[in-house]
């Protein structure tokens, strides 16, 4: 029987809201082994920097933005480990502001900077065979003119300098759990607006963005099948590959965030499979599905997922 | 020396606010062993379903409510394990709405459905020797006419179909921590109202509900002895058995919920013992007291409780 | 190369907001070993009691305040273990109110009580060789007349009865994260007011308080170097020893609190070193840096810190 599989994971080393494992090379090597063992072939570094914290020693950001020189070059480490385990590595672009709802952001300046960082990174790491794609790290759930423009401009630039490597984005959906608001009065997804917005967005980014992987955790479970159907149909229409970002953390719990209940992950994977989606990425393996996670319930999730691969839940 | 003991635990597999362990049969077997080792003889499944998530494949709820078919039949698993370890299993009734403060709930319809689910469950599992009781899963802290009526109607129905198996409820108390509100201005328990309400409630449920186990975590510690005294006296008056639900999670911490400090659990157990309560149930063993818990501080609590049994804290 | 080191840690056994490990003597012994292995020579018990919960069986508080007799005498245990591992133990004074912003507090009465508790403790434990200092447990971030007065009065009393043992305080700084408020509109440190307030405070406590260790987690990282410079200069001016309280928990995460990212701790330690601070205390080793912590990410932090000591990050 055909089963949709989690073939990719984010790497969230410069994180916004996920507590840090404090792993060194050895622990990361072990975790890449665990990924490999369940069939993950692609790792996506979610961002190369967030404000002043960096995933590699970017001389540009250290000099121009006063960024902190990181104690480790995680980009180098991830590229080596991806190479060692035969995986593809996607490089996530820079996030200049944690709160980019901030009205004072000048997106043109940001985009210009983001391009120079991408150039610097390609200069430093482009020769690694595992460097196989780009991830545009800004997350939107609805139409946002400046960010959509940046997807095109920054994306085209990435493609140009790298010999057309594929580009991934992972948007949200504006459902009841989008802003961690799960009281009954929180609003559900406006399907019509979602369709209209993403038809427009995909129309613009088609030809630049190769893969779109919507986060599947913003919606109540009842809405997921219809939303995934819309996403898949739109992606097909615009010639974009459609993955699902099947989140492995639980958005229904009173603290942010523990690993998800296996039943829920299974439900979400099957919903994606039922509309023809063939690949899932997850946010993210190391904290929420890994036998090495700080959360012991992730160890259970790993075992259950292995049983799934072995056909136990067919 | 006589020491009050934790002889029962809830099983919170379809949970509202406790992150899931993602255990399979093997891990659960191990956890039942750990329960048995400290003298637990009764396991109480807190609910057989919550909205669309189910603890067993209820064809009724799958068909009529669009519930999700669970990947595992936990009721069957728990009944087998309870049988294996010589424990009693209490079946928790269905929870149709997570937020049942919602004014739009039609309790008559809910109660009618709940009875049909109970019938379905008894039909499926009534032959397991470990099936030894019922748990009415709605939690109230004060008088609530419709829910008290349901306790009687649903409870009588459970007794009738099952040859009079015992029935348990586990109410709250409207103290300072009842709604996770531990600022100084939050109100303390209104002892008079508590006594008045529960005298009325117990008057109505007497003859149906056999055991009442108030949650002991809603109050500041200073109020607990007096509240427990009231509860025990009322239960005696109305011919109901009085346990204490000695919660093993900590309501005083900034995230919900870690395992409790042993000192606090000991304090609460002793407060119950001092008014003549002889049995405690806990919410719940597997996350908050178990050597298998995802929270390592639960492993410590297990060791301290073992020392307590051995007389170390006498 | 000279590297600033963490030479001290708080012990947070009677805690306000850190979930309890539920360790017994054996587990604590193991943790003291782990402290010793990275060069910690001083342990500071953060408080001897909080409202009705106590770190030792204070007959005074049990009788006069209805405090609970603790199941274990942690003060005795810590003094024994500190002695065993050749460490100094600082005794933290009593905290009568969890919320001491409360206007109704009568500080004179509190201070009188605090002195009697200190006397009781010295009577009980003063003969332990490891009893080597006092920690005044009230935390202020700005000028607070009554508490500064108490620092002097209580501090002088501690010195008098104990043959002049050294006294430590660990204040906050009123920055963006001081009240767990990390939205962009939260206010940054007012450097001028901070300087003015602490010049005045140190003027008053000089000659009583021997060591001041500001908490380094209330500020955004950008502000830390300037704030530390002010603190060090003021301490030098007033003849007070200046440590840094380099917090090992992460204030940037959505739940309170996981272990900090190693990169951030390193950044903070280096900021302190750059202004001439030579010793760090941390809040606190056992939960956030220990190989025995309930948080597995603390195990990683311990390994990284060991690599730091070995020169890996020079």
Image (spheres, coloured by chain):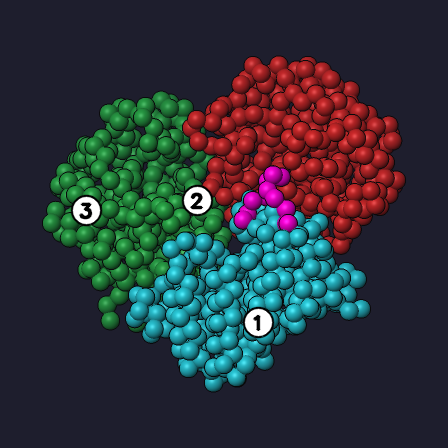
Chain colours: A red, B green, C cyan
Please tell me the numbered disc located at residue B18.
2
- CA distance for labels 2 and 3: 32 Å
User: Magenta-highlighted stretch: main secondary structure?
Assistant: loop
Measured as percent of width and height from the top left, residue A212 is found at 68, 26
- CA distance for labels 1 and 3: 50 Å
Identify whether A257 is placed above or below A150. below
Which residue is found at the position 22% from the left and 48% from the top? B191
- CA distance for labels 1 and 2: 45 Å
Image quadrant occupied by the N terminus of chain A: top right
Label 1 marks a residue whose chain is C
Q: Secondary structure at mark 3?
A: helix
Q: Is residue B89 visible?
A: no
Please tell me the numbered disc located at residue C209.
1
Which residue is found at the position 79% from the left and 62% from the top? C314
Q: Residues within 10 Å of mark 2 (few under 14, many from 20)?
A: some
Measured as percent of width and height from the top left, residue B275 is found at 20, 59
Residue C212, image quadrant: bottom right
Measured as percent of width and height from the top left, residue B6 is found at 30, 58
Foreground: disc 2 or disc 3: 3
Q: Is residue B229 visible?
A: yes
Measured as percent of width and height from the top left, residue C191 is found at 66, 52
Query: On the image, numbered disc 3 is attached to which residue?
Result: B192
Q: Residues within 10 Å of mark 1 (few under 14, many from 20)?
A: many
Residues at badges 2 and 3 in contact (C-beta under 8 Å)? no
Residue extent of the magenta highlight: C179-190
Q: Secondary structure at mark 2?
A: loop
Residue C40, image quadrant: bottom right
């Amino acid at each position: 029987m055909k089963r949709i599989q989690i073939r990719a994971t984010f790497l969230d080393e410069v994180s916004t809201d996920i507590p840090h494992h404090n792993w060194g090379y050895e622990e990361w090597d072990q975790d890449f082994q665990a990924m490999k063992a369940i069939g993950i072939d692609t790792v996506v570094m979610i961002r190369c920097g967030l404000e002043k914290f960096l995933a590699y020693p970017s001389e540009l950001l250290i000099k121009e933005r006063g960024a902190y020189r990181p104690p480790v070059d995680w980009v180098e480490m991830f590229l080596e480990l991806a190479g060692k385990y035969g995986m593809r590595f996607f490089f996530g672009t820079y996030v200049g502001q944690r709160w980019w709802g901030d009205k004072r952001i000048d997106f043109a300046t940001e985009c210009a900077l983001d391009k120079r960082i991408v150039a610097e990174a390609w200069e430093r790491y482009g020769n690694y065979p595992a460097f196989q794609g780009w991830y545009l790290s800004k997350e939107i759930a609805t139409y946002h003119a400046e960010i959509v423009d940046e997807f095109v401009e920054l994306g085209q630039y990435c493609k140009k300098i790298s010999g057309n490597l594929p580009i991934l984005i992972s948007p949200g959906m504006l459902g009841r759990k989008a802003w961690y608001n799960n009281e009954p009065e929180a609003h559900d997804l406006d399907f019509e607006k979602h369709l209209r917005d993403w038809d427009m967005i995909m129309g613009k980014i088609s030809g630049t963005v190769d893969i779109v992987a919507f986060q599947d955790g913003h919606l109540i479970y009842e809405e997921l099948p219809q939303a995934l159907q819309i996403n898949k149909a739109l992606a097909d229409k615009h010639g974009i590959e459609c993955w699902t970002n099947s989140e492995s953390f639980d958005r229904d719990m009173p603290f942010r965030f523990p690993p998800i209940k296996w039943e829920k992950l299974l439900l979400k994977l099957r919903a994606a499979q039922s509309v023809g989606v063939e690949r899932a990425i997850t946010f993210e393996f190391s904290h929420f599905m890994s036998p090495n996670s700080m959360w012991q319930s992730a160890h259970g999730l790993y075992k259950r997922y292995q049983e799934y691969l072995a056909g136990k839940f067919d």
